[in-house]
Amino acid sequence: MNKLPLSILLVEDHLAIARQVLDFLDGLGWQTDHAGTGALAVQLATRNNYDVVLLDLNLPDIDGLQVCRAIKAGAPSNVPILMLTARDAYEDKARGFRDGADDYLTKPFDLRELALRCEALARRQQLHVHQEMRVGPFTLQTRAGRALLGDAALPLTQTGFKILLLLCREHPHAVSRSALLQQLWGSQPPDSDALKSHIYALRKQLELAGAAGMLVTIPQLGYRLAFDSAASP
């Protein structure tokens, strides 16, 4: 799995949970700060630049939703906030998103999923700020619609570039055929062979660039990028 060197602020008052998360993220080589109160969280988040804030809602001094609003209003950049909470009702999640949360993870959670969500949030923020995304061996210059594999430009069609962009955004997860059709053509997609043709063309371009096996078909689902896979699709 491709991991970015992220800077994380964990806001969690439960010390056992905080230590478990911090140890795991430190093991990935990420930079981590910890706040056990909402007041300290706001102070750190408005003073430092973080890639992602992990925010527990149940804090001893300030409600987590209030902390979320304060961070979104005062942070030096629009830092993504991933809420961590045992509140799993739809109303709680809706309130969190309305108050500025970018993602939501219900306790107890898998630490590996937590890392994946952090990477996805950081990639989206990087794309928004820099108009350039780096995932594995790819560099995608979104404003120019240009894709590089290593240092070599890929001669992709506009649709081929969009497909690669969607796959990079969701890496290492697969993107379903229905999601690709919706993102590429909205509510009026062409016949199913059109997507197959564009996938075939993208795969051939990757093969010609020396990246055979990197675009993998997931039966009954869709497609994903596998940077460490040499398996044929």
Image (cartoon, grey):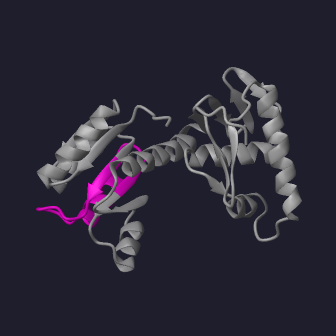
The residue stretch that appears in magenta:
53-82
The residue that appears at 82% across and 27% down in the rendered structure is 208
Q: Nearer the viewer, residue 128 or 214?
A: 214
Residue 40 vertical placement versus 24 (above, below): below
User: Is residue 12 visible from the viewing direction of this image?
Assistant: yes
Residue 91 vertical placement versus 84 (above, below): below
The residue that appears at 37% across and 50% down in the rendered structure is 114
Q: Residue furthest top?
A: 151
Is 202 positioned to the left or the right of 142 in the image? right
Is 220 positioned to the left or the right of 54 in the image? right
Q: Nearer the viewer, residue 48 or 181?
A: 181
Quadrant position of the C terminus in the picture: top right
Q: Nearer the viewer, residue 143 or 153?
A: 153
Instruction: Point out residue 139 in the picture as x, y percentages from the top left corner.
Output: 64, 31
Q: How many marks?
A: 0
Q: Quadrant of residue 99?
A: bottom left
The residue that appears at 23% across and 38% down in the rendered structure is 23
Residue 16 vertical placement versus 25 (above, below): below
Asked if the magenta segment contains residue 71, the reply would be: yes
Instruction: Point out residue 141 in the picture as x, y percentages from the top left corner.
Output: 67, 35
Asked if the magenta segment contains residue 215, the reply would be: no
Instruction: Point out residue 132 in the picture as x, y percentages from the top left corner.
Output: 61, 36
Q: Quadrant of residue 191?
A: bottom right
The residue that appears at 33% across and 73% down in the rendered structure is 88
Is 91 positioned to the left or the right of 196 in the image? left
User: Is residue 101 visible from the viewing direction of this image?
Assistant: no
Residue 178 vertical placement versus 126 (above, below): below
